[in-house]
Image: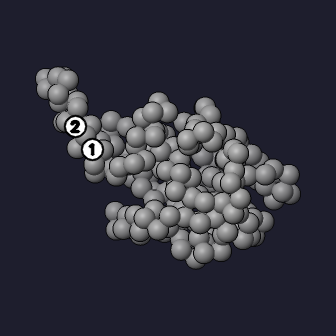
Amino acid sequence: MTLHLRFFFKITFVSLSILLLTSVSAVSAKEAPKQQVSQLIPITEQVASLVLGIIRYSRWPEPLQQVDICVVGQVKHAETLLLATHFIGDVPVVSQSTSIEQVLSLTTECHLYYAGHLPSELYKQLYAAVGSSAVITIEEENEHCSIGGMFCFNINNDKATFKVNLDAVSRSSVRIHPSVLRLGQHRSGL
C-alpha cells in the first residue's frame, strides 16, 4: 500500500485514471466494468494520498526526523492515515487522534493538524493556537476553504479534491511547493 501511495502523489487523478483503466483492462477486459477512478480508490486512500503528497512537497524551517499528524475533531476519512505509519523517503509519518483540548493547551507537538468536524468557535481557537507556527492545517470537508485551514478537502461523488487558502499558507513558516498551490487553485472549479 505504501508503494501505491508513493506512486499516487506523483501523478494527478486524471493521469491515474488513465493508467488504472488501462492496467485493469489489460488484465481482463471482461472482468473490468467501466467505472470512474474514484470508485476504484477508496476515499480514505485518496485522502491519505493527498495528505502525504502535501507533506512531500512541503519544507519546514528545520528538517524533520518524523512528521507527526494530529487528527482532531470528528473525522470521516482519516482511517488510512491513522492505521499505519507511512513513509516519505526515509521520514516516517505518524498520525494520532488528538483531543481539541490537547491542541488548545499545546500539550501535543504536531507538524500537521488534520481537522474533522468541529464547532466554528473551536476552529477559530485551533488556528489562533497554532498561529504562524511551522505547521500545516487541513480541514477534512470545507468546500469554501474560508475558516482558516491552509488546505481544505472536498469529498464529492467518491472523489477527494482540495483547495488552498493562500492567506493561511502565507502565515505559516512551512513552505509549500508552488505546483501544489497551483493544483489547489485549479481544483476550485471542481
**Residue lying at 23% horizontally and 30% vertically, measured from the top left:** 24
User: How far across and how far down the image is residue 111, in percent?
Assistant: 69, 54
Amino acid carrying label 2: it is Leu
Q: Residue at x 49, y 33 (%)?
A: 2
Q: Is residue 170 left or right of residue 33?
A: right
Q: Nearer the viewer, residue 171 or 123?
A: 171
Location of mark 1 (residue) = 17
107 shown above or below 30: below
Can residue 140 be seen here? The reply is: no
Could you classify mark 2 by the number of other residues whose Cα lies within 10 Å: few (under 14), some (14-19), or many (20 or more)? some
Q: Could you say which is closer to the camera, residue 144 or residue 113?
A: 113
Residue 49 at x, y = what percent? 47, 45
Residue drawn at the location 45% of the way across and 62% of the way down: 180
Q: Please tell me whether residue 40 is drawn above or below residue 156 in the rendered image.
A: above
**What label sits on residue 21 in the rendered view?**
2
Q: Given the image, on which type of amino acid does mark 1 rest?
A: Ser
Image height of 176 relative to 171, above or below? above
Q: Residue at x 66, y 69 (%)?
A: 172
Locate residue 78 relative to residue 22 in the image: left or right. Answer: right
Alpha-carbon span between mark 2 and mark 1: 6 Å
What is the x, y in percent for residue 73?
67, 50
For the residues labelled 2 and 1, say whether their Cβ atoms are less than 8 Å apart: yes
Q: Element under label 1? A: helix
The quadrant holding residue 30 is: top left
Extreme residue in the left direction: 30
Foreground residue among 92 and 42: 92
Which image quadrant: the C terminus? Answer: bottom left
Is disc 2 placed on a helix, strand or loop? helix
Task: Say if 135 sits above or below 78 in the image.
Answer: below
Mark sitting on residue 147: none
